[in-house]
Image (cartoon, grey):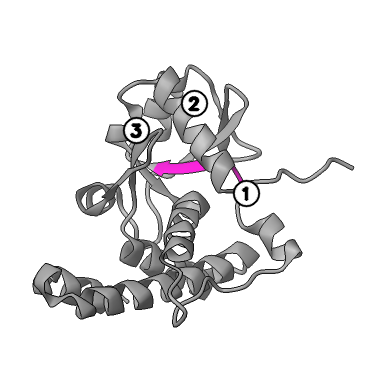
Amino acid sequence: MSLPNLYDWERIRLALRQLDAALPGLLPSVVLIGGGAVWFYREMLRQWADPDFPVPPTTAAEELVWLSKDVDFMGLTVSEAADLLQTRWDEQTHTFHYAGLEIDFLEEGLVLFPDEALRSARLAELPDVRFNVAEAALLYAEKCALLARKSRPQDALHHALLRQFLRCEFCRQAERPVSLRPSRWIARAKDV
């Protein structure tokens, strides 16, 4: 029996740094989606440390299913990604294996599509890497659609985290009306 892959925020950051160094220009042209993107919002929620909106608790068993691969992206087709990575798509795992990483390039989700994901992406600027991350409201809408059609344990975890993050962010924005962009806030609230 093989040991489970252990994923966490530091491993995601390491994967992003590794890809940025090996493939300059990749990260600005794609959007982080999936469990890695949700973990980004989990980390933001943790750093905000708002007592009214804590990070939803998870068990050790739930942590093991949070991520099923290193990173998921949207913005390239599988064919484009294969050409860029110079490796083939693994039909069994539905991922690429590149430099020790397991990477997925989703062409479209149930309600998440590349054009909107790229247009609305947030630029995440960490001290060691910059990347685009899918807008939390879009990820939430995708998780709602997934929960209605599939039964994967990570989707319920991601859904709960995104719901909590969006609630917290909406309240934070409402507390600072000067920085509030009403049209964006209303559009995002409609998604949620």
Q: Nearer the viewer, mark 3 or mark 2?
A: 2
Q: Which tag, 1 or 3, sits closer to the chain's start?
A: 3
**Residue 18, numbered circle:** 2
What's under tag 1, amino acid-wise?
Ser
Q: Nearer the viewer, mark 2 or mark 1?
A: 2
| Stretch in magenta | 68-73
Q: Position of residue 58 (x, y in %)?
A: 65, 69
Q: Position of residue 32 (x, y in %)?
A: 40, 45
Residue 39 visible in the shown view: yes
**Kind of element beneath mark 2:** helix
Circles 2 and 1, Cβ within 8 Å, touching? The answer is: no
Please tell me whether residue 113 is drawn above or below residue 143 in the rendered image: above
What's under tag 2, amino acid-wise?
Gln
Q: Quarter-wise, where is residue 182 in the image?
A: bottom left
Q: Which tag, 3 or 2, sits closer to the chain's start?
A: 2
Q: Nearer the viewer, residue 89 or 139?
A: 139
Residue depicted at x 53% and y 41% = 12
Q: Position of residue 115 (x, y in %)?
A: 23, 48
Residue pointed to by mark 1:
68
Residue depicted at x 66% and y 38% = 92
What's under tag 3, amino acid-wise?
Leu
**Residue 27, numbered circle:** 3
Residue depicted at x 77% and y 46% = 4
C-alpha distance separating marks 2 and 1: 19 Å
The number of numbered discs placed on residues in the rendered structure image is 3
Q: Residues within 10 Å of mark 1 (few under 14, many from 20)?
A: some
Q: Nearer the viewer, residue 52 or 97?
A: 52
